[in-house]
């Protein structure tokens, strides 16, 4: 006979509502298990929680849930950069099966650097050196004068400049990939194929090369940018990659948001040098030929005019 689960005495659970950020007990003590309440069943005294680390959902006992307050825990020391590959694996746990740990990660992302972080993590998965990833991050967030000087350019493309004479971070990152890493980028997406979850998921699963996409969702304060590649999502706000599914795409901007459409997107075609890396030899089809082939099934997903 198995041991009977101890009855919880957490009276704080009575104050928990849908949408609350909670820590969950009885799930191991290696780190704090954080998630958001998706639904509550008062009859069974259970709640459905979506974990922050994996974005998967689990049913837990309501009494094991406690509203998470950062003041209740000792702040974890961290370096000024989110490049944390040297953090011991035991303190963060292992990646979910089939997924990878993101080398660059910020759960708060207060500076809205999701495009930069996602591309840095993509370079890591393409087996570039750490200094290459750091270089891209520093250049992407530099002022335009430093940016232009580093690229040895005398003018700024219109796509990079914003109406307020600022810079578009997505376009800056794509320009760096082309100029410094010899990547190619596709035409922008054909928006009519990315106006709902099922339609967008179908297209993203068919495209074999990495896609940088900006997602617009209801109840989200800003558009969220991620990279999608090989049926997984590379998200700067997630500690690990996670599977590309209808559910993860629907809430890609956050637990309490709902997908509306993909508002911007470009394909990223890795360089010839990148494809020759020994660690990339297992990838047989990068999707490049299909993109350039007239009449191929994926060309309709891009705006050729």
Image (cartoon, grey):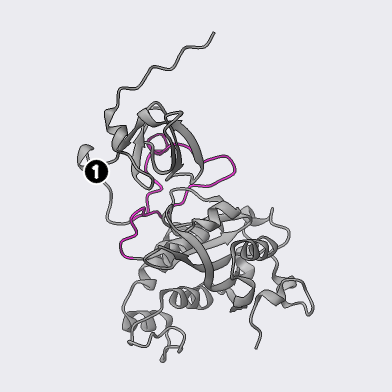
Principal secondary structure, stretch drawn in magenta: loop
Q: In the image, residue 42 lies at what x, y percent?
A: 41, 33
Q: In the image, residue 191 lies at what x, y percent?
A: 59, 76
Q: How many marks?
A: 1
Q: In the image, residue 301 lies at what x, y percent?
A: 67, 74
Task: Say if the magenta span includes residue 185.
Answer: no
Q: What residue sits 42% from the left and 91% below the top?
A: 155
- Tell me: residue 259, above or below residue 10: below
- Which residue is at the front of the view, 199 or 96? 199
Q: Is residue 133 visible?
A: yes
User: To which residue does mark 1 refer?
Assistant: 70
Bin the neighbour count of mark 1 within 10 Å (Cα to Cα): few under 14, some 14-19, many 20 and up.
few
- Which residue is at the front of the view, 88 or 220? 220
- Tell me: residue 48, above or below residue 207: above
Decide if residue 130 is on the left or right side of residue 69.
Answer: right
- Tell me: residue 54, above or below residue 91: below
Q: Residue furthest top?
A: 1
Q: Quadrant of residue 18?
A: top left
Q: Quadrant of residue 292?
A: bottom right
Q: In the image, residue 240 lies at what x, y percent?
A: 48, 48
Q: Is residue 186 visible?
A: no
Q: Quadrant of residue 83?
A: bottom left
Q: Which residues are magenta?
A: 82-111
Q: Secondary structure at mark 1?
A: helix
């Amino acid at each position: 006979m198995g041991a009977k689960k101890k009855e919880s005495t957490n009276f704080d659970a009575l104050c928990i509502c849908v949408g609350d950020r909670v820590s969950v007990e009885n799930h191991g003590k290696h780190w704090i298990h954080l998630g958001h309440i998706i639904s509550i069943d008062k009859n069974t005294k259970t709640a459905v929680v979506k974990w922050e680390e994996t974005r998967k959902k689990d049913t837990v006992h309501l009494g094991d849930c406690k509203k998470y307050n950062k003041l209740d825990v000792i702040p974890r020391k961290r370096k000024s950069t989110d490049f944390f590959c040297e953090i011991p694996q035991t303190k963060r746990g292992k990646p979910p099966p089939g997924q990878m740990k993101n080398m660059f990660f910020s759960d708060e992302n207060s500076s809205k650097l999701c495009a930069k972080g996602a591309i840095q993590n993509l370079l890591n998965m393409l087996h570039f050196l750490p200094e290459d990833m750091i270089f891209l991050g520093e250049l992407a967030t530099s002022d335009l004068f430093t940016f232009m000087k580093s690229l040895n350019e005398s003018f700024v493309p219109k796509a990079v400049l914003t109406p307020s004479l600022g810079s578009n971070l997505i376009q800056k990152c794509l320009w760096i990939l082309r100029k410094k890493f010899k990547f190619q980028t596709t035409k922008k997406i054909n928006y009519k194929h990315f106006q709902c979850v099922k339609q967008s998921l179908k297209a993203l699963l068919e495209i074999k090369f990495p896609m940088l996409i900006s997602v617009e969702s209801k109840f989200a304060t800003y558009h969220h940018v991620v990279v999608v590649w090989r049926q997984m999502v590379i998200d700067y706000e997630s500690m690990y990659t996670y599977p590309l599914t209808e559910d993860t795409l629907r809430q890609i901007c956050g637990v309490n948001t709902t997908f509306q459409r993909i508002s911007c997107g470009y394909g990223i075609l890795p360089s010839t040098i990148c494809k020759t890396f020994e660690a990339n030899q297992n990838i047989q089809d990068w999707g490049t030929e299909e993109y350039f082939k007239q009449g191929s099934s994926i060309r309709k997903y891009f705006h050729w005019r």
